[in-house]
Structure formats: C-alpha cells, structure tokens
Image: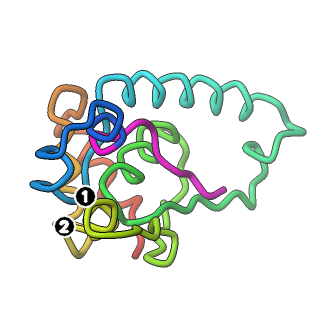
C-alpha cells in the first residue's frame, strides 16, 4: 500500500493564502485536521485488517510512503499496530511546481533517526516519545 498524507500545514497555508507559511518553511508536517484524518484512517485500517478478504489483512502486505514529514506522520499513525516496516520511497515525493510549491517537496531530514526526530518535533502534540522509539524499527529507506 502506498500511503499519501493527511492535510498538511502547506495545504492549510495555500487555502488561507498564507505566503509566509508557504515560503519560510519546507517539508511541512500535518495539521490538527490532519491528525483527525490519520485517526480516521487508523480506524479504517483496523476494521479492514479484521476482514480476512481485505488486502490490509494479507500477510504479504507492504507499506510505502514518501520520505516527507507529512507522509511519514500519516503512515505511522494510520498503520500503528501493524508489524510491518514502512518503506520510504524518495521517488514517491510530490513533484513541486514553481518556487512556492516546489519548496515543500524537498525533504528537510535524511536518514532514519533524523527523519524520526523531525517527525517527532513537527507533531509534538500527538506524538509520544515511546511511540517514536517503537517506530524506529519500522522505517526503511
């Protein structure tokens, strides 16, 4: 499964015409609304895993996401409890168009530990350090 991302700070900045939010930051994390979307996706995935006919319940399930903060946050939260690695695919990053959108397609961290530190920092309200430690073994680059 390729997991995209929930609502990001970049999406919110675009919607609100917040040029400062678009230009001063790259690799945005998810918003409060994005966390709610992740929780809803987590519930959906849990329901699907209970159905033996679902591809989410298949023993051959593989999980993929882009290495951008918002995609990793979404994927780890949505698939929490699934004992499968999350494979990060650099080629799955969004292709930015132009100087504003393009900045948000550039990752701000490289390497599993740096990425997890960034994910943890970006999502502090909902991200617990014990979860972060537990998830360290789930990321593959």
Pick the residue in front: 99 or 90. 99
Name the residue carrying label 1.
27
Residue 121, can we see it? no
Q: Residue 104, how many percent across, how many down?
A: 29, 60
- Tell me if mark 2 has few (under 14), some (14-19) or many (20+) residues whose alpha carbon lies within 10 angstroms of its own: some
- Specify whether 10 is left or right of 140: left
Q: Residue 82, how many percent across, how many down?
A: 55, 44
Q: Looking at the image, which residue sits at the far right?
A: 53
Question: Is residue 140 positioned above or below 70 on the image?
Answer: below
Q: Which quarter of the picture shows residue 13? A: top left
Magenta residues: mostly which secondary structure? loop
Question: Is residue 130 positioned above or below 97 on the image?
Answer: above
The segment highlighted magenta reads 1-10
Name the residue carrying label 2.
108
Model colouring: rainbow
The answer to whether the residues at label 2 and label 1 have Cβ atoms under 8 Å apart is yes
The count of marks equals 2
The residue at the point 50 percent across, 78 percent down is 91
The residue at the point 51 percent across, 70 percent down is 92
């Amino acid at each position: 499964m390729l997991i995209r991302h929930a609502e990001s700070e970049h999406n919110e900045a675009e919607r609100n015409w917040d040029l400062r939010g678009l230009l001063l930051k790259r690799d945005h994390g998810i918003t409060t609304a994005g966390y709610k979307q992740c929780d809803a996706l987590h519930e959906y995935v849990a329901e699907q895993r209970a159905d033996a006919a679902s591809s989410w319940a298949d023993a051959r399930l593989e999980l993929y996401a882009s290495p951008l903060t918002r995609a990793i946050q979404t994927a780890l939260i949505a698939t929490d409890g699934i004992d499968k690695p999350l494979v990060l695919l650099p080629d799955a990053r969004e292709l930015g168009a132009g100087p504003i959108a393009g900045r948000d397609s550039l990752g701000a961290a490289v390497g599993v530990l740096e990425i997890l530190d960034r994910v943890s920092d970006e999502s502090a309200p909902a991200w617990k350090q014990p979860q972060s430690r537990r998830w360290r073994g789930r990321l593959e680059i």
